[in-house]
Image: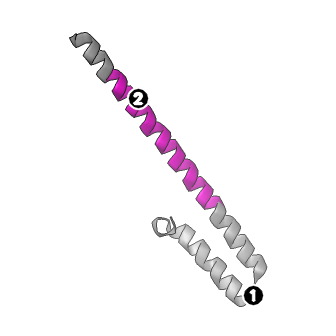
Amino acid sequence: MAEGDPDLARQLAQAAEAIERGDIAEARQAIQEAARRMGEAGERVERQEAVESTLAQLQEGREQIGQAGGT
């Protein structure tokens, strides 16, 4: 996920650098921001999956109507 989101990758890199420096507060903040971004990305994926599922159901319904009309 981080490779597709430069801001997320930056947040994770900041967290790693802060940990190396021993700056736990900064690391915690960077990790929290990264987690927020990951949550937002997850919500977008869930919405996209719901749309794709709905479209598949609509297509299936159209095919059933077409078959019923053809018999």
> Which stretch is magenta?
36-62
Could you tell me the amino acid type at mark 1?
Answer: Gly
- Left or right: 62 with respect to 20? left
Q: Position of residue 43 (x, y in %)?
A: 57, 48
View extreme (left): residue: 70
Do callouts 2 and 1 mark residues in contact (Cβ within 8 Å)? Answer: no
Q: Position of residue 69 (x, y in %)?
A: 25, 11
Residue density around tag 2, few if under 14, some if 14–19, many if 20 or more, within 10 Å: few
- Left or right: 8 with respect to 30? left
Could you tell me the amino acid type at mark 2?
Answer: Gln
- Left or right: 32 with respect to 53? right
Q: Is residue 4 above or below residue 21?
A: above
Question: For residue 22, which numbered disc appears in the image?
Answer: 1
The residue under the point 28% across, 12% down is 68
Secondary structure, magenta segment, majority class: helix
The residue under the point 41% across, 29% down is 57
Q: Nearer the viewer, residue 63 or 27?
A: 63
Residue 57 in magenta?
Answer: yes
The residue indicated by pointer 2 is 57
Residue 49 in magenta?
Answer: yes
View extreme (right): residue: 25
